[in-house]
Image: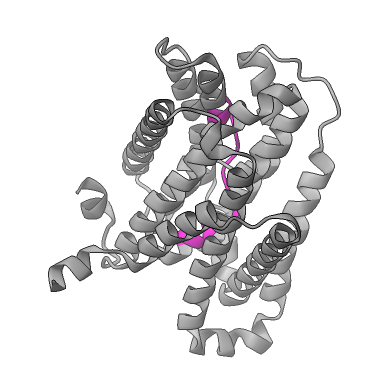
Amino acid sequence: MNRLRQALDPFLLLLIATVALASVLPARGQGAGIAGAVADAGIVLLFFLHGAKLSREAIWSGARAWKLHLATLGTTFVAFPILGLIVERFGFVPADMRAGLLFLALLPSTVQSSIAFTAIARGNVAAAVVSASFSNLLGIVLTPVLVALLMQKSGSGSLISLSSAEGIVLQLLLPFVVGHLLRPWIGGFIERHKAMIGRVDRGSILLVVYAAFSAAVVEGLWHKVSKGELLVLAGLCIAMLVLVLIFTLLLGRMLGLSREDAIVLQFCGSKKSLASGVPIAGVLFPASAVGPILLPIMLFHQIQLMACAYLARRYGAQPSAGMAPAAAE
């Protein structure tokens, strides 16, 4: 019994329970608005606390990690799209699903969950903030360009790049900067309440999962495809994630990255942003095609959160000497 308890990750169980709750009791109408607002507030608080926790030296060190940032961007916008093009040629997969999987591969990295998981894993949080935020900002322009080139869609039209950029600045970067500027006054409090910071990291992820999955369920997630097609789609999403996790692990070793930077590469490079994917798809594709296009990213989003939550807890429990043993198990 003790071994079973040790094998079960409590946070992973909470994630599964959150998905189940959203499937049975999704937030609707005014409730969905409240859930989204609470999740947004949790994210703002998360980044405020991360900014307050990091020293000035750590932030400069994160910004200077150019090799790490290039590796993350290369994984997100080169390696992942190549994988998407390969999967797009699988004839046994329905055309809408193949298009959705390719669109998934062209999206930028997530921001909040990538940084939260990096913090849980005791990685380089400052570098994760820079890498994930830059990926998301670059994706506002680069993803539509890649869609136009690789999916033969028109890249013209009015993209909501300004509002997306404002969201990243106001919800993520600004709280981080404000928290860091207030560090001389609140840094001591933050250090004395590290357990509370950890609960905020995990709580923010659970809130985002519930809000995102609720929206997917309300939009008819479980009625868009048959059970067999859903299993095939889930299998492909898992396979893509596993391949990219292995790729980022090997790339980090090949580049000689430190343990902390290798964690950033794995979590920022393997993620795809549902928050960016939904508005971009709404602009680039006809209304009738948006639902099927988004189904893979909605499913991948949940899979990546669960898988990376498990990895983050494993890495966080390891000695600082290395992350390779858990990744290889």
Q: Position of residue 130 (x, y in %)?
A: 61, 53
Q: Which residues are magenta?
A: 103-118
Residue at 61% in and 69% down: 46
| Above or below 294: residue 95 | above
Front-most of 27 and 286? Answer: 27
From the image, which quarter does the N terminus lie in? bottom left
Q: Position of residue 129 (x, y in %)?
A: 59, 57
Residue at 68% in and 67% down: 38
Residue at 50% in and 90% down: 192
Q: Is residue 141 magenta?
A: no
Residue 287, quarter of picture: top right
Residue at 48% in and 39% down: 300
Image position of 287 (left or right of 268): right
Q: Position of residue 103 (x, y in %)?
A: 58, 26
Residue 150, quarter of picture: top right
Question: In this view of the protein, can residue 259 be seen by the observer?
Answer: no
Question: In this view of the protein, can residue 187 be seen by the observer?
Answer: yes
| Above or below 153: residue 118 | below
Image position of 21 (left or right of 122): right
- Magenta stretch secondary structure, dominant: helix
Front-most of 31 and 147? Answer: 31
